[in-house]
Amino acid sequence: MPGPTDIQIVKSNAVWTLNASGDWSVKAIDQIDDKLRSIEDSNFPAIIIDTTNVSSFDTGGAWLVERLRERATRKGCSFEHRDTNKKRVELAKVVQLSSGLVPAAQTRPFQNPLELVGKAVSSAWQDFVTGCYLIGSSLKGSKSRSRHGGMRRVTSLVNQMDRMGLRAVPVIALMSFLIGAIIAQQGAYQLKFYGEELLTVYLVAILHFREIAVLLTSVMVAGRTGSAITAEIGTMKMREEIDALDVIGLNPVGVLIFPRLLALIIVLPILTLISDIAGIAGAIFISDIYIDISPTQFLYALNTEVEIVHLYVGLAKAPFMAVLIGLIAAIEGLKVGGSAESLGQRTTSAVVKSIFAVILVDGLFSIFFSVIDI
């Protein structure tokens, strides 16, 4: 017959050993709780708890063990849980993870720069691997639905194109109009000293077609659409909706990420073209007012002197920018934990990473096109 629920203390200068016995289950937890709390409040050097002689041990007893572990960790003392039955030790570890009693990682005021670089490189590599997985899983999910005669989620794709593209037209057009007008005004002001105001047309057209339109549009989409994708996927992850899709046999990546990624690839070049048109319109407006170049003269110079290849260069960058924005937003959304704080951090991280990646890739494209003389 098992002995009474109790805990015997063997003290020494180096360690206190607690020998538990009896019933350490939920129904008997009150019999030992007060005594264990008094031990926790004591100044022990190090502590070992042995539950080998315990007759019944469930999550209630495991919770007491982990509470004692947490108190010892706070005091900076070593802790050890001994038991010949390894399942009890594993149960205590499970309770430790699920109850939030895992000791918080100690933050250091200063970190080794090499350590920070290593963490950044490791995180970037993990994001790259995840991005490759998302691309493959998106394509595989889409093809598998088609192969079995399923619908291609055209409704979802059209809805995403409406939200990402059509609703973004006003802000993209307005900002591009203003940027084009500003570039034209500043260019005309500087070129006026050399009597070459007409070169403003070439300056605005080439700069806007090749760089400004696609860069401005991508940054706007990263801030507007990328953050929305991260927030949507992150919220679904917090609510376990992604797990629910997996349970009912649907590919979460194909259902959630593929339509958004495809919609971005379609709408970003269109938005870039709209940005080109709006930027040129702003330049025409300012040129007519500021340097007396009429819209007819402006368009004639644009048509005869500016090659169409400059427009194609900018449009060619747009699909790559779209893939980057969509993947980064989706990856950050999948990293969201169970708190609103995590959602906010990941949304911010998605916008910052997307803008950085867009600017970096735009610079690489500029170098590439310069090398091949386009």
Image (tube, rainbow, N blue to C red):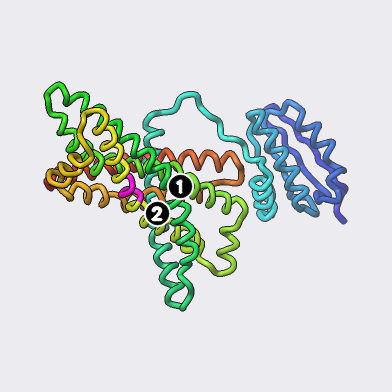
Whether residue 123 is visible: no
Q: Main secondary structure of the magenta part?
A: helix
Q: Which residue is denoted by mark 2 in the rendering?
A: 264
Residue shown at 45%/61% (left/top)?
Answer: 157
Of residues 186 and 195, the one nearer the viewer is 195
Q: Which residue is denoted by mark 1 in the rendering?
A: 225
211 is within the stretch colored magenta: no
Q: Quadrant of residue 297?
A: top left
Q: Position of residue 185 (x, y in %)?
A: 26, 28
Q: Secondary structure at mark 1?
A: helix
Disc 1 marks a residue whose amino acid type is: Thr
Q: Position of residue 184 (x, y in %)?
A: 25, 32
Q: Which residues are magenta?
A: 271-275
Query: In the displayed image of the protein, which residue is found farthest to the top?
Result: 193
Of residues 374 and 87, the one nearer the viewer is 374
Of residues 298 and 271, the one nearer the viewer is 298
Q: Position of residue 334 (x, y in %)?
A: 50, 51
Whether residue 7 is visible: yes
Of residues 200 and 24, the one nearer the viewer is 200
Could you classify mark 2 by the number of other residues whose Cα lies within 10 Å: few (under 14), some (14-19), or many (20 or more)?
many
Q: Quadrant of the N terminus?
A: bottom right
Q: Is residue 268 above or below residue 355?
A: below
Disc 2 marks a residue whose amino acid type is: Leu
Evaluate if marks 1 and 2 touch, with contact meaning CB atoms under 8 Å apart.
yes
Q: Is residue 142 left or right of residue 87?
A: left
Among numbered discs 1 and 2, the one appearing first in the sequence: 1
Residue shown at 48%/67% (left/top)?
Answer: 153
Q: CA distance from mark 1 to mark 2?
A: 9 Å
